[in-house]
Amino acid sequence: MDDVKKFVLDHKLGEILENKTFKDCTTLQVGGKIRFFYYPNSIESFLAFHKFYRPSGRPLFIIGAGSNVFASDADFEGVVVNFSKLPLKYYRIGDTFTCSPGCSVVRLSYDLARLGYTGGEFLSGIPATIGGAVYMNAGANGLEMKDILISAKLLSKDGVVRDYENSELGFGYRKSRLQEEGLIVLEAKLKFQKDESGDVLKRVKEMKEKRNKSQPVDQKCAGCTFQNPSGHSAWRLIDQIGFRGFKINNAQVSKKHCNFLINNGDAKSEDLLELIKRIQKNVKEQFNIDLKCEWVLVNFDNVSLF
Ligand SMILES: Cc1cc2nc3c(=O)[nH]c(=O)nc-3n(C[C@H](O)[C@H](O)[C@H](O)COP(=O)(O)OP(=O)(O)OC[C@H]3O[C@@H](n4cnc5c(N)ncnc54)[C@H](O)[C@@H]3O)c2cc1C
């Protein structure tokens, strides 16, 4: 693995760290040590790194804001890449915003509001990067990334870069073609509309306030843990099985919102995993419904949460 560090440093491709853990780079704040954490200094640098690294077959994981990632307690013997240190966040031509993968969607939504653009208000409460939001087709308040995305420049596993139109990306509920094929977001073009009412910022603040009241946003969590099964709310099912506030060591079901599992101290990934399985088992037994975990699991062997 030391060849990776040497390659990045010799070719001045960015910063590479050896002392990071998933605990420090995810909002859930759990997970083991990471062998190399790489911040590319440009997309070209990342592509040069990718060309060098991929043939080795060693693990590669792209992390955004880490707000949907659940990593195991084991050490990760590979490279985690983060685009947040790319110098350009986004630029605008007309009503089209071309965004870098590491751009914060919260920051973008506030900038849009200040510039008098509507359509990005729903992003204000999602602590994501553009890359993670496109990959997950993140959404809130009735809108999803698929509703604002024009196209995305993506890198395939075998190193091919191409622009994909929205219609090619197979978007569904927290689902995209990117997940199936391991495509990496290098850039995304989003469209918004001018709004002269002067009310956009007010709407953003109202949405944020509503969210702060209903979700444990000040706690270590990774958003909703389970997808809503068709015709049901996951939080209600969890409440109905009596799990509101239920704990396994420091892994706990939030009392504020039952579909948020929180790290209430120094939880271990294995405690959270056990809690997820316990909820799934009880919901299945009582309602014959399979709850599908929405989190992205990293570095777990032979674990499937549907
Ligand atoms: C308090 C809180 C509230 C939340 N509310 C919502 C909500 O309302 N709606 C919602 O949909 N989600 C919500 N989430 C979950 C989370 O914010 C979203 O899933 C988000 O899209 C994850 O983005 P990220 O940048 O943090 O990605 P990460 O969590 O870092 O990664 C998620 C996945 O995206 C992949 N990924 C990241 N960057 C790239 C890239 N450049 N190219 C390819 N793949 C990439 C990762 O490999 C991983 O598989 C919430 C989370 C929290 C903590």
Image (cartoon, helix red, strand yellow):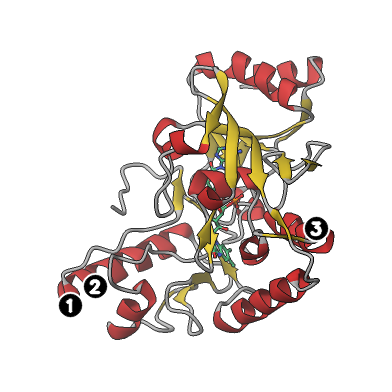
Q: Residue at x 64, y 75 (%)?
A: 207
Q: Is residue 63 above or below residue 206?
A: above
Residue 125, how many percent across, how many down? 64, 67
Mark 2 neighbour density, 10 Å: few (under 14) some (14–19) many (20 or more): some
Of 116 and 129, the residue lying toward us: 116
Q: Is 29 situated left or right of 48 in this image?
A: left
Q: Residue at x 40, y 40 (%)?
A: 170
| Mark 2, secondary structure of its residue | helix
Residue picked out by circle 3: 111
Labelled pair 2, 1 in contact (Cβ < 8 Å): yes
Residue 306, how many percent across, how many down? 28, 52
Residue 278, how many percent across, how many down? 29, 69
Q: Residue at x 72, y 16 (%)?
A: 7
Q: Residue 33, which numbered label?
A: none
First in sequence: mark 2 vs mark 3: 3
> Which amino acid type is marked by label 2?
Val
Give me the C-alpha separation between circle 2 and circle 1. Answer: 5 Å
Tell me: is circle 1 under 8 Å from ligand 1: no
| Mark 3, secondary structure of its residue | helix
Residue picked out by circle 2: 283
Mark 1 neighbour density, 10 Å: few (under 14) some (14–19) many (20 or more): few
